[in-house]
Image (spheres, rainbow, N blue to C red):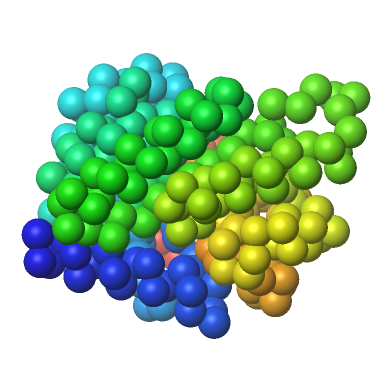
C-alpha cells in the first residue's frame, strides 16, 4: 500500500495547495491517458455517468459495480497520477466499495448523500474514512450533498445553501477533507458556503455556460473543480460535429491530433 498511500497524500495535499485543483473527469483508458499527458494536470477523477454511458447504462448505480470497478482499475493502471473515483452513493455499502476501489488503485472518491437522513449520510462518510484508515491510506473523500439539486423550483435558495452548509459541516466533522456541492454556481452562494465550511474545503463542478472560471473559484477559496459528465459531452459534441461535416460533403477537422 506504500505507493497507494503516497498517491493519497499527494491528492490530499493538492486540495490544500494555494492553486485550485482542476480535476478533469475521464471515463476510459484513452481519455485518462490523454488527460494525464496534458501539461499541468496533477490528478484525475473518473465520472460515473461517463463510465456508465460507455457501457450503455444510465447513471445512478445501474452499471454493475464489478464492471464499474474494472474500468476504474484499468484507468489507474494506465496512468501515474492519483485517481479519484465517483462511487455514486456507495452501492449499498460505502465502506466496502471504498475498500474495493483502493484495491484497484483509487486514492479518493465522491460519495453522494442523496439527501438521506443526516445520521445515515454521516455513517456512510465514517465508513469510507474508516476503510481508508484500515488500509493505511489517507483516502480523499469528497463528500457530496445534493441539497441544492433536490430543492424544488420554488425552494428558498438561502435555505438550500444553509442546508448544504449544515450537512457539509457534519461530513467534515466525520472525517471527510472536502465537501462537494453540485448546483452551486452563483458567486454569492459560493462565498456563503466557503464561509460556512472554511477555505479549501469546498469542491465544485464546472457547468458549461453557468460556472465561474476556475481562477475566480480559486480566489473565493474553492479547493477543487471537476468536470463531471461534461468532458465526455465535449468529446461527443466534437464527434457529432465532425460527422455532420463529413455527411454534408466536407472533411475532418484539419487540426485533428494523433492522441491515441
**Which residue is at a point 64% across and 65% down the rendered structure image?**
198
Q: How many marks?
A: 0
**Which residue is at a point 53% across and 42% down the rendered structure image?**
144
Q: Specify the quadrant that holds the N terminus.
A: bottom left
Q: Position of residue 80 (x, y in %)?
A: 19, 67
Observer-nearest residue: 46 or 248?
Answer: 46
Q: Is residue 142 left or right of residue 96?
A: right
Q: Position of residue 175 (x, y in %)?
A: 43, 52
Observer-nearest residue: 135 or 257?
Answer: 135
Q: Is residue 254 left or right of residue 69?
A: right
User: Does the rendering let one see residue 7?
Assistant: yes
Q: Specify the quadrant that holds the C terminus.
A: bottom left
User: Does the rendering let one see residue 180?
Assistant: no
Q: Is residue 80 left or right of residue 174?
A: left
**Which residue is at a point 33% across and 32% down the rendered structure image?**
94
Residue 56 in the image: above or below residue 41: above
Amino acid at each position: 500500500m506504500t505507493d497507494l498511500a503516497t498517491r493519497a497524500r499527494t491528492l490530499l495535499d493538492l486540495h490544500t495547495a494555494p492553486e485550485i485543483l482542476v480535476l478533469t473527469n475521464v471515463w476510459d483508458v484513452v481519455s485518462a491517458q490523454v488527460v494525464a499527458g496534458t501539461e499541468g494536470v496533477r490528478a484525475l477523477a473518473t465520472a460515473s455517468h461517463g463510465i456508465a454511458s460507455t457501457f450503455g447504462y444510465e447513471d445512478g448505480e445501474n452499471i454493475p459495480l464489478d464492471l464499474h470497478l474494472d474500468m476504474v482499475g484499468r484507468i489507474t493502471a494506465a496512468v501515474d497520477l492519483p485517481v479519484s473515483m465517483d462511487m455514486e452513493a456507495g452501492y449499498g455499502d460505502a465502506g466496502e466499495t471504498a475498500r474495493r476501489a483502493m484495491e484497484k488503485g483509487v486514492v479518493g472518491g465522491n460519495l453522494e448523500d442523496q439527501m438521506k437522513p443526516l445520521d445515515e449520510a454521516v455513517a456512510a462518510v465514517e465508513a469510507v474514512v474508516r476503510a481508508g484508515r484500515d488500509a493505511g491510506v489517507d483516502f480523499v473523500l469528497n463528500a457530496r450533498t445534493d441539497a441544492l439539486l433536490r430543492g424544488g423550483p420554488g425552494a428558498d435558495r438561502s435555505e438550500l445553501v444553509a442546508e448544504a452548509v449544515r450537512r457539509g459541516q457534519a461530513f467534515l466533522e466525520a472525517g471527510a477533507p472536502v465537501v462537494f456541492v453540485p448546483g452551486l454556481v452563483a458567486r454569492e452562494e459560493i462565498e456563503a458556503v466557503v464561509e460556512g465550511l472554511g477555505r479549501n474545503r469546498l469542491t465544485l463542478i464546472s457547468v458549461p455556460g453557468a460556472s465561474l472560471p476556475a481562477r475566480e473559484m480559486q480566489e473565493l477559496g474553492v479547493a477543487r473543480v471537476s468536470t463531471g459528465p461534461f468532458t465526455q459531452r465535449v468529446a461527443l459534441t466534437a464527434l457529432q460535429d465532425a460527422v455532420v461535416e463529413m455527411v454534408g460533403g466536407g472533411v475532418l477537422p484539419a487540426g485533428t491530433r494523433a492522441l491515441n
